[in-house]
Image (spheres, rainbow, N blue to C red):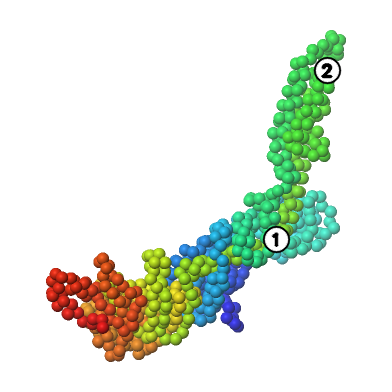
Amino acid sequence: MPPDAPAMDLEDVPGVGAKTAERLRELDDPAGALEREDVAAVASAPGISTGRAARIVRGAIRARHGDPGGFLATDRAREVYDAVLTRLQERATTTYAAHRLATLYPTATASRIEEVAAFADRACERSLDPSVTEALADVEPIERPDDVTVRDRCLATADAETYQAATAAFPELPVEIVDDARGLADLARGYSSVVALDEAFAGVTIEGDVTVDPNAFDHPEEHVPERALAFFATNRASLRAAATVHRRAGVDAPLDLDELEDALDDLAADGSVAGDDELERLNVAVDDLDAAVSTAESVANDRLRAAIEERDVTIEGADLLSLVERGAGVDSLLARELADEYAAAVSAAREHVRDALALRDDEAERAVRIFGDEPTYPVERREEGVSRLREELVAERDRRAAKRKRDLAGRLADLRAGASVLVRDALELDVELAVARFCADFDCTPAERGGAGFEIEGGRSPLLDVPFDDVEPIDYAVDGVALLSGVNSGGKTSTLDLVAVVVVLAHMGLPVPAESARVPAVEELHYHAKSQGTLDAGAFESTLRDFAALTRGADAKCVLVDELESITEPGASAKIVAGILEALHDAGATGVFVSHLAGEIRDAADYEVDVDGIRAVGLADGELVVERSPAKDLLARSTPELIVEKLAGEADDAAFYEELLAKFDGKEA
C-alpha cells in the first residue's frame, strides 16, 4: 500500500456495491484479504465465485493505487491483453493461480507497475522444479467445512448477555438459559455433558457430566473440538499437498510441517480421531455386541444340547413324584443332572463374548451378567446384562473419543492460522511460477519505461500461431508517429501486435518478449484493428469523431492503427490519414500506422512523415522472402510489383513486364 494511504472502505472498491460489501463483511478480515490480494479468501465469502473475487481484488488494487483505469482504450487493445493473460494463465497449475493472474493488468500508475515489477523479479528467481508442479496439482484453496452441529452437549448460563455471546461464539452447540442449579441438573439429564459458563455455579454438586468453565470463550477447542477437526478434515488433502510443495520448493513454512503432518495422521477423513487402537476396539465392541451375544447363545445351546444327547438320565419314581409335587420342570432336572455341563456351556458363551469383543478383564467381569448361573434350556441372554454392558462400553468409548478429540483439537487449533497461510503461500507460489514460466518460455526481459517513442530489439510475439522458437526476432524503433509499409503477409500486423504486447506487458510491470525494450510511459493504448470493408456514411462519421477525440491529450497515448484507409475510397483515405498523423505529430503522440497508401499519405501530409518498410527481397518457390524487421526510411514494394519484377526477368514477354514495372512509383533506391 502506498505510504500514508487511508483505510479503504469496502464500498470504495470499484465494482463493490452494498450487497457485495455485506457478503465480504462475513469474512474474518475482508480488508486484509483485499490488501493481500487474496483471491481465495475473498472467494470464500458467501455467493462470490473465484472469478468474481479476482475482479473485486483487481478493483481494490486500483483503489489502493489511485488508478483511474482505462489504459486499454480499444477493443483490439483489450484483445491483445486477453491473449497475453491467456498465455500467462496457461502456465498456472492451479485454478486459483489462473484467477489470481487476472489481477495483473496494464496501468499508467507507476506505484502499481513498480509493485508488480518487484513481484516479477522475485518470481523469475524461482526454480522451475517439475516435482513442485506435481505437488501443486493437489493444492486447493482452504474451504470452510459444512455446518458443524453438535447436539449431545450444551452450554448453559443464567445471564442474557452471556447467552448472546455464547450463541455467536459457539454456533455449533445448543446454548440454554437456566435459572438455578436445579435447571442445570435438568439439562444434565438431557445432554451427555453440560458446560456452565457462570462462575456462580462453581462448587455446586450436580449429578451427571457438568463442568463449570467461565473461560470457555478463551479455549473453544475444548468444548467444541469438532470445529478444528472439521476444518482440518475438510482441507486435509490440500494441506498435505501444500506441505509437500514447501518441502520440494525449499521455501520457509509458516508452521512446523512435521507437527502438522503428525497431527493429520491422527485425523480421519470424516473428522474422527484415527490411529487409536483402543478407541477402535471400543467402537467395534459397541457395534458387534448384539451379534456376539447371539452367537454366544448359539455356542451355549449347541454344547448343552450335545451334552443332553450324550447322557442317559435315570430318575427313580419317588424322585420323579417329589419333583412333580414341587412343580419342578426341566430346569430342576438340569440343575440336578447336568449342572456341570450347563456351567461349562455358559462359560463357553461368556468366553465367546469376551474374545469376540476383545474385552478387557474388568469389562469381561461385567459381561458375566449377560448369562445367568441358574440352569435353563435353552440358554438365553439377560437383556438387562446386555444393556448394562452396552451402556458401559458406550460411555467408555465416548469418554475416550471426547478426550482424544479435545487433545487433537488442541494440537490442531494452534496450527490453524499457520495452516491457512501454508495453503495460501503454496497457491501464491504457483502464481509466481506461472510468471517465471512465461518469462522463460518467451525469453522475456524487463523493459524500460519513459522517453519518446519506443525501441524494441530482438522482439518476438508470443501471439503467433507458430512455435515460439520459429518466430523471427524483430528490431523496430519509432520516435513519434510513423507509417509502416510492406507487402501483403509480410508481417505488418504481427509487428503491430508485438509493439502492443510489449507496451501492455511493460505497463503491467512484467518483463517483455525481447532482448531489450524501451516503451513510452503512456496512459492509454489505442490499437485499431483493420476495418472490414468500406464504412457507410454513419460509421465513417463515427470513426472520424473517434480519431478527433484521440488527438486530444495524445502525448499520453500510444496509437497503433492497421490499414485505416479501408474506411473509404483510397484518394480520400490518404488525405484523412495524413490529417490524423499531423494532429498526432503536433500533439507529441507515439504511434504506428500500417498502410498500403504510405506514399500517398506521405505526399498529402504537411510534415515529413517517417515511413518504415518491411522489405520483401523477392519470391522463392512462390513464397515471399521477407526481412521481418522494418527498415527506416523505406517505402516497401507491394506484392504485385515483386511479381511483375520476377516475370520481367524471364525470357518470355520480358518487354511487356518491363513496361508494367515502369508504371510503379516509389521503387527502392
Estimate how packed mark 1 is, as few (under 14), some (14 to 19) or many (20 or more) residues with alpha carbons within 10 Å: many
Q: Residue furthest front?
A: 651
Query: Looking at the picture, does residue 88 appear above or below residue 232?
Result: below
Observer-nearest of 491 and 138: 491
- Which mark identifies residue 577? none
Observer-nearest of 345 and 422: 422
Observer-nearest of 462 and 633: 633
Q: Could you tell me if residue 75 is visible in this image?
A: no
Q: Residue at x 44, y 69 (%)?
A: 84
Q: Which residue is mark 1?
A: 413
Q: Position of residue 613 (x, y in %)?
A: 31, 79
Name which residue type carries label 1: Ala
Estimate how packed mark 2 is, as few (under 14), some (14 to 19) or many (20 or more) residues with alpha carbons within 10 Å: some
Name which residue type carries label 2: Glu
Q: CA distance from mark 2 to mark 1?
A: 66 Å
Q: Residue at x 75, y 52 (%)?
A: 403
Q: Which residue is mark 2?
A: 337
Q: Disc 2 or 1, which lies upstream in sequence?
A: 2
Mark in front: 2 vs 1: 1
Q: Could you tell me if residue 525 is visible in this image?
A: yes
Q: Residue at x 41, y 74 (%)?
A: 459
Query: Looking at the picture, does residue 239 appear above or below residue 487?
Result: above
Query: Looking at the picture, does residue 106 appear above or below residue 348?
Result: below
Q: Residue at x 33, y 83 (%)?
A: 632
Q: Position of residue 399 (x, y in %)?
A: 76, 48
Task: Locate residue 204: give its quadrant.
Answer: bottom right
Q: Quadrant of the C terminus?
A: bottom left
Query: Looking at the picture, does residue 578 appear above or below residue 88?
Result: below
Q: Residue furthest top?
A: 317
Whether pointer 2 and pointer 1 mark residues with C-beta atoms closer than 8 Å, the reply is no
